[in-house]
Image: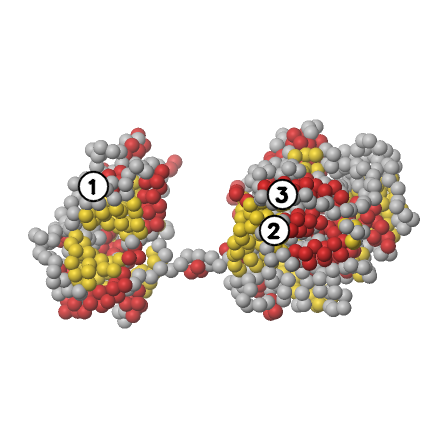
Amino acid sequence: MTGTRVSQTGTRIDTTRTVKFTFDGRDYIGHPGDTLASALLAHGVRRMARSFKYGRPRGIIGAGAEEPNALVQLGEGALTTPNVKATQAELYDGLSARSTSGWPSLDFDLKSVLGQGARFMPAGFYSKTFKWPRKLWPLYETVIRKFAGFGDAPTEPDPEHYDHLHHHVDVLVVGGGACGLLAALQAGRAGLKTLLLDEQNELGGWLLSDPSAQIDGRNSEAYIRSVQAALADMPHVTVLTRTTAFGMYEQNLVQAVELVQDHIAPEQRQAHLPRQRLHKIRAHHVVLATGAIERPLVFGNNDLPGVMTVSAGQTFLHRYGVRVGQRVVICGTSDLIHDCAEGLAKAGATVTVADVRHGAVARNSSYTVMAGHGIAEVTGGSEVKGVRLVPLHATRDEVAGKGSHIACDVVLSSGGLSPTVHLFCHDGSRPQWDESVAAFVVPRQGRKGVACVGAVTGAFDLPAALAQTTEAMQLVLATRGKPDRLQTPTCIQPKRLAARPMFRLPDGRAEGEGAKAFVDYQNDVSAADIELAVRENYHSIEHVKRYTALGFGTDQGKLSNVNGFVITARALKRPVNEVGTTTYRPAYTPVSLGALAGTMRQELFDPNRYSAIHAAHVARGAALEPVGQWQRPWYFAKPGEDLHAAVNRECLAARNGVAVMDASTLGKIQIDGPDAREFLNRIYANAWTQLAVGKCRYGLMLDENGMVMDDGVTACIHPTQFYMTTTTGGAARVLNWLERWHQTEWPELKVWMTSVTDHWSTIALVGPKSRAVLAKLCPDIDLSPENFKFMDWRAGTVFGLPARVFRISFSGELSYELNVESGYGHALWEAVMAAGAEFDITPYGTETMHVLRAEKGFIIVGQDTDGSMSPLDLDMAWAVGMKKPFSFLGKRSLARSDTAREGRKQLVGLLPEDPHSVLVEGAQIMESATAQPHGANQMLGHVTSSYHSAFLGRSIAMAVVAGGLQRKEQTLYVHAHGKVTPVKVGGSVFVDVKGDRQNV
C-alpha cells in the first residue's frame, strides 16, 4: 500500500499550511483539515493495529465512525484519550498518537505467534479452555487481560471541563448529508425552530466524497454552500457540527455529544469553553437523515493492511487528496465501484475492477473491468501484495472456473450499503429486511414523531432520496401546522446497472478450509466461526453474537453485523428477515465519561451540606466526616489527643457532666392536615391515635416486607400538625416514601408533607448537668422533672430566641434538643457554650454519639439493620401496634412464615472476654473457635457496631446472631483477620438498663 498525495479539486484540506504530529514516536507532517488516518495514509503508513484474538496486522479499512481497526491513544498525561478512531481524529499541530494494540509492540505482537495456531482457537475457545485447572484461573485472567488491551485510561485528573445544554425544538434533523440539508432547509423555511446535527467537522455527508453529484444544477460543493448560507440567515435554525446523536429515548429525547475543542491543540483551547458538550434535545419531530454505511465483502485474508472499503478509498481521494494505492483492485456488487474506479484512475492509479455482475462494463478506458468475477483471497504476508480472482456463476454464489492472480497494493471492496438504523431502533424497534436493496431498513413512513429520510429507508440513489425526503417533510410540516407543497430539487443521475447482492464471496472451498475470511475485524470473527456457532446449536442471532463476539467491539458491528446476519441465515437455511438483527442500544459511538457527567462532578455532583453552626465547629478544630452529604463534626480533639482520647473525654463528659452536639442534620418533616394522625398510624408500626399535644413518640418505619427502613421521634405540635425526625441520611428517602404512599395509595387522606430540615437548627444538650445549663438560658419554661418529663416538648424562648425544646435522648442521659430558626443556630450554640462554661461543657461529635447510643442499645438504621431486620428481630416488639384498625405498612409481612420463624438473626449485645479487645465491625460470628469439618462451623451472624466504652472501662459490641435472643450467656467466637475473639452474648443495653438516667 503506497499512499500518495495527489492534486484534487474540492479537497477539504489546506495544502498551503502544514502541521506536525507524531505517531508511535515518529514525526510526520500533515495539513489542516486532515484526519490522523488521512495524514498517515499519505505517508504510506500501512499497519495501524493488531487484532484482538490472533494478533494479525490490521490497517485502516473505513473512513469514519465505522472504522474497527485504527484505534489510537491520543495525547499524554491527564489529557490522554484512549481508543479514538484515527479516521475521526482531526489533525492539529503537535498531536501525539500511538497504537493501542500489540504487545510488546505493534511490529511484534506475541499474539501473532499464538495466532499461527488459529485453527485450534475457534469461536468459544476461551470459554471452553480456561476452566481447568480451576486454581490457574488467576494466571489465565492476568495473561488474557494483558493481551486484550485497547488503550489506557488516564490515571491523572482531567483538567478540562464539560457541560450540558438543553434544547426544545420543533424539528431535530440528525445527519447533514444531502437529505439532512434539504430537510433542515424545508423546516427552516416553514418557520419551525430547527436544530441540525452532524458528526463530521462540516456539513455535506457523502456529497463531500462525490464531486460528480449535481443538485439543482450545482455541483456538490456549491449546493452545500448555498444551503449553509440559507440556514445561516434563519435565526430560528441552529447547526451543530462535530456533534454525534448517540441515543434516542422516550418522548423524542435525543442525546448528542459535541466535540467542542477536541480538534484544537490543548494549549490553544479557550478556557471558558468546554472540551465537550452533551446536548439533551426534546423535539416535537425528529428527522433521521442518518444515511448508510458501506459494508465490505467477506473473502479470504480480507483483513490485511491495504484492504479497505470502496467508500473509504473514494473519501480519502476526494476529501483529503490521498490516493490510497498505485495498483488498485476494486471488487463490488453495484455501480458504486465504478464511481471510485474513475476517480482513482484519473488520479494516476492503475485500477482493475472485479464486478460480480456479468453484464458490467467499464465507463471508459481508464480502468479495466473483469465482469462476473470476485475475490477468492488476498495474498501477502503483513500487507496486500495481490489478489486471486475467480469467475462466478451468473445466478448462484458459486465459483464457475479457475481464476487468475493480479498483483496490487490496495484492495477495495463494496458489498452494498447498510442503512444507519441505530437511533430509530433505540426504543426496541427492529429494522426490516428489504430484499430489493439487500439491507435492513427503517419504514419510509417512520413512526409517530419520527420521520426517516434518504438512505436510512433504503433510498440509496440521490434523486430517489431527495424525492422521499420532500415527501416525508410535507407530512412533518403538516403535523406542525405548516402545510406546504414542497419542491424536490432536480437531480439527474445516469442510469445504473442493478446491483447483485453478495456477502460472502465464494472461493471454491468449504468454509474454514481456505484463507480466513473475516466478518468482524476487531474481534477476529470469521465466517467459519459463525457457521461453527450454528453447528453447535446456537440458532438465535443474539446467541450467535455472544458465542462468537460478533459486533462486540468499539465499532459495534457497523461494518460486520449485516454480513454476520446473512451468513447466519444461510447457515441456518432460513430467510434473513426471519433471523433478524441483534438489539441496537445507545451509545451509537463511544461517549466520554466527562461529557456524560458534565458539570456534575465533585461538590456539584455530591454537594457538601453544612449546618448553620458549621463555622463554630471549624473554629474549635473539629475533625469532619460526611454523613448523608452533611459535613458533621466527627470529634473535637484537644492538643495532643487522637480520635480515641478525644472520644473517651467527650463520652465521660456526657455521662458525668454536660456535653453538647449539633443535631441540625437530622431529617425534619412537618406533617399537616386533619388526617395527619391517621397517616402516621399507617406509616409507622406503632400507634399515634392517642399522642397528645406536647408529647413525643419514637417510631419505627417499615417497608412492605416488614423490615425496618427508618426510625425517629415525632412530636405532636397541635392536633393537625406533627413534627417528624428521621435519620440524617434517610431524610430525602423518607419524604419520597411518604409522598409515594399518600399520592398513589391513600390520596383520600387530607395531609401534606413539607421538608423543614434546613429550617431548624438543633442543639442537643446532654448530661446530668444539662438542666442547670438550660435554666440559665430559658426563663419561661418550667424545666422541673414533674412538669417537663421525658418525651415531652415545650415552646418558649432560649437565649431570647423563639424555640421548641424537646426532652428526648439518643444517649440515655438527661437531654434536651433545642430547636430554633436556623439563622440563629450559631448564636444559640455560642450562648450554650458560654452558659455551660462553669460546668466544663464539652462539644462532641458523631463518634461519641455512636458510642453513647451503643451503650444504651439504640440502633442505627443501616448499620445495625440491613433491610432484612424486622422489629421482632431487633427485640422491639413494643414498637409495633398490632391492634391498630388500619393495617400499617409491613404488618401483613410480619406474619409471613419466614419473618416469624425461629432462628432468624436477632440483635444482641456482645462482651469480649478480653475487655480491651475492640471487635472489628462486620466480623463473622461462629460457635467454634476453629474450623470444623464439612462446614459444621457455620457463620451465625456478624458484628454491627463495636466500640470502647470509657464509661464502662471496656469494649462493647452489638451484633445480629441467628437465634440470638435465646443465646444469652452463651460464649461465641468472632473471627476477623485471622484472629479469634471469644465473646459472651447478652442484652444490647449496657448502661442504665432501667432507663433511670434519662428520666431523672
Task: Give above or below for 780 relative to 996.
Answer: below
Q: Residue at x 19, y 60 (%)?
A: 802
Residue placed under numbered mark 2 in the picture = 191
Q: Residue at x 83, y 39 (%)?
A: 497
Question: What percent of the width, then of the height, locates residue 524?
Answer: 68, 44
Numbered circles on residues, count: 3
> Which badge, 2 or 3, is on the more N-terminal residue?
2
Which amino acid type is marked by label 3? Answer: Pro
Mark 3 touches mark 1? (CB < 8 Å): no
Q: Residue at x 52, y 42 (%)?
A: 250
Name the quadrant containing residue 895: top left
Question: What percent of the width, then of the height, locates residue 724?
Answer: 25, 49
In the figure, is residue 176 to the left or right of 885? right
> Which badge, 2 or 1, is on the more N-terminal residue?
2
Which amino acid type is marked by label 2? Answer: Gly
Give the foreground label among 3 and 1: 3
Number of the label disc, if any, that sits on residue 318: none
Residue placed under numbered mark 3 in the picture = 483
Extreme residue toward the top, this view: 573
In the figure, is residue 608 to the left or right of 342? left
Q: Quadrant of the N terminus?
A: bottom right
Q: Residue at x 24, y 67 (%)?
A: 827
Mark 2 residue element: loop
CA neighbours of label 2 inside 10 A, class few (<14), some (14 to 19), many (20+) = some
Question: What percent of the width, then of the height, locates residue 356?
Answer: 82, 39
Residue placed under numbered mark 1 in the picture = 688
